[in-house]
Amino acid sequence: MNPFKKELENWKSGGKVIAPVIDLLNIQPVEFSEGKAVLKMHAYAKHHNVVGTVHGGIFCDLGDVTMGCALVSNLNEGESFTTLELSTNYLGKVVDDVITATATVIHRGRSIICVECELHNSTGKLIAKMKSTCMVLT
């Protein structure tokens, strides 16, 4: 079995957080399946930028972690990955709210994996759309 899948399931079951940034931002697992991940976090004042809204980098961190979780379910034994490109379109602001990120693998090639992610606020409004291109490492 892909060791990353075991780590994700263990984290979802209340086990060890899989990366320090997840602990730092208090990102919580919601759902994992083949090629898909759903995570959430409560963003509030400690995540604000100078204008008093959640910093765009926080959106990127949440989306990047979520896309990574979706991606690892598509890795084979002995494979890892690195991000080649990450893009974000910001579509709304957050001041104090729970953000839910949903990522889906849209292409799994021999050496390239493409993932998309949407971030929604607690009312379901789309606040950011992201995509990432990653390279499979052996």
Image (spheres, rainbow, N blue to C red):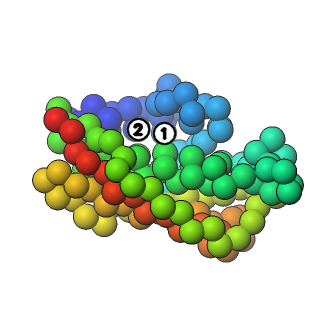
The image quarter containing residue 59 is bottom right
Q: Which mark is residue 8?
A: 2
- Are there few (<14), some (14-19), or many (20+) residues within 10 Å of tag 1? some
Give coordinates of residue 31: x percent, y percent: 47, 52
Side (left or right) of 26 relative to 15: right
Q: Alpha carbon of mark 2 to alpha carbon of mark 1: how far?
A: 6 Å
Q: Is residue 116 above or below residue 12?
A: below
Q: Quadrant of the C terminus?
A: top left
Which residue sits at x=41%, y=46%? 69
- Are there few (<14), some (14-19), or many (20+) residues within 10 Å of tag 2? many
Which residue is at the front of the view, 133 or 94?
Answer: 133
Which residue sits at x=33%, y=42%? 82
* Amino acid type at image mark 2: Leu
Which residue sits at x=72%, y=52%? 55
Which residue sits at x=55%, y=28%? 20
Does the image show residue 108? yes
Give coordinates of residue 131: x percent, y percent: 43, 63
* Amino acid type at image mark 1: Lys
Does the image show residue 77? no
Task: Identify the element where label 1 is drawn.
Answer: helix
Q: Is residue 96 above or below residue 75?
A: below
Task: Identify the element where label 2 is drawn.
Answer: helix
Q: Which residue is mark 1?
A: 12
Q: Residue furthest left?
A: 110
Which residue is at the front of the view, 72 or 113?
Answer: 113
**2 and 1 marks in contact (CB < 8 Å):** yes
Give coordinates of residue 95: x percent, y percent: 82, 58
Q: Quadrant of the N terminus?
A: top left
Q: Is residue 74 above or below residue 13?
A: below
Which residue is at the front of the view, 55 or 25?
Answer: 55
